[in-house]
Structures are given as C-alpha cells and as structure tokens.
Image (cartoon, grey):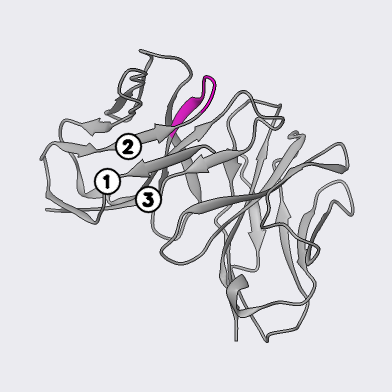
Amino acid sequence: EPEVTQTPSHQVTQMGQEVILRCVPISNHLYFYWYRQILGQKVEFLVSFYNNEISEKSEIFDDQFSVERPDGSNFTLKIRSTKLEDSAMYFCASSEENGTPLHFGNGTRLTVT
Amino acid sequence: GDSVTQMEGPVTLSEEAFLTINCTYTATGYPSLFWYVQYPGEGLQLLLKATKADDKGSNKGFEATYRKETTSFHLEKGSVQVSDSAVYFCALRNAGGTSYGKLTFGQGTILTVHP
C-alpha cells in the first residue's frame, strides 16, 4: 500500500538554526498537511497546502514557518530560526481529495538544543 | 473553537479484556469523527470514522458510535489482544471549515495489553 514517507526520522539542531523537514506524499494525492505534537501534548494542525499554495494555517504557523512543494514529489516544512519550543514530533499527511481520509507519515522528531 | 477530550491514560489491560476509551467533543456545525491509532515507531493510521449522528464506525473489532446528544464517540473493543497495544487518538473534522484536512485531536490514550 502506498505510504507517506518522512525524512529524517530524528533531527537535532541548535537554537537559531534553520531546519527543513522533508516529506514525500502519496503520489496521486493533491492535499498536503503538516501537524506537530509536542511531547505529552495534543497533535496540532499547522498548515494545509493545495494547488501550490497554503489553503489554511493555524496561529502556530507564524513567519518562522514556511512550506514548499519544490518538485512533483516532495513537500517540505522549513523553520527559519528554531527555538527550544519547536522541539516536537512533526507529522506530514496527504489526502487524495478534499474531505477524504488523511494518510500520515511516521513523523520526524525534532530536538532543538 | 473545536476541541476533543479523551479519557486520561495510560490504560493497561489483560488480553481478552473489554476496552473502552472515552472521547467527547465540542464543535460547531456537524463534524465528522475519527479514531486514529499509532503503533510503536509508526505514523497515525485511521482506525474508523463516522460522519453523522448515530453512525457506527467499525474496523478490526473496534467500534465507536457517533452520539450527538452526548457529544461522544467512545471507542470499544470486546476482546483486546497484545497487538492492540498502541496510542489511540480521537479526532474531529468540522465540515464548516475551509479545509477539510484540518483535524482537531484529543491528547491520545496509551493502551498496553498484557498476555
């Protein structure tokens, strides 16, 4: 069964550094999402992306965050200048159409030191 | 805003025991409700869903019924197995939103099943 792939599985970075989290959504899916889960807290919506633009974003998704689909297969989340509180598990997801079930990747654990 | 509350965990059961994980929600409009499961080292997988009141979602022996009157979507299984050990997330998607992908999650419940 096709799956969403995320790399790396674990990323350690120093505060203030830029980090890029990578995702390869399922190939025929059109909608892409990023969620995050801070340890011990809820999974939170960050952003949705369709037709090469952001369709919705949460208040967490401030100017430090950006998303991009640089080619036909990758979907990236960039954090410009990481803070300690950005440490979390970041999940990428994709769906075939608007309203169809989301397929999640295994997540990237980001640790900011 | 929308919110989902799950029962506090962790939950520890013996094999073949009955499982209930409570989930209640607050939402405007007519949300769809979901249970996701996360096995160790894996991503979130859709377990079951219900899109309108009184619908029952079921999969792999798990069931949950959409109860509008009590704003609940409790997960049940009659006889759990060791392989059911995982984290279970209740979630809602509000059809009134502009993005149907925006899920609101509960905090997750860790289930451990012992032989």
Q: Judge the density around disc 3: few (<14), some (14-19), many (≥20) Cα neighbours within 10 Å.
A: many
The residue identified by callout 1 is: B7
Tell me if residue A88 is in the magenta stretch: no
Cβ–Cβ under 8 Å for marks 1 and 2 = yes
Front disc: 1 or 3: 1
Please tell me which residue lies in front, B8 or A98.
B8
- Compared with A35, A110 (above or below) is below
Of the numbered discs in the image, which one, if any, rests on residue A65? none
Q: Residue at 59% across / 68% down in the picture? A: A9
Work out which quarter of the rendered image holds the C terminus of chain A and state it. Answer: bottom right
Q: Residue at 41% across / 64% down in the picture? A: A40
Q: Are marks 3 and 2 on the same chain?
A: yes
Q: Residue at 60% across / 23% down in the picture? A: B95
Badge 2 amino acid: Cys
The residue identified by callout 2 is: B23
- Residue A102 in picture, x, y percent from top left: 59, 36
The residue identified by callout 3 is: B108
Lateral position of residue B99 relative to residue B93, left or right: right
Badge 3 amino acid: Gly
Which residues, given as a range, are shown in magenta?
B28-34
Of marks 3 and 2, which one's residue comes earlier in the chain? Answer: 2
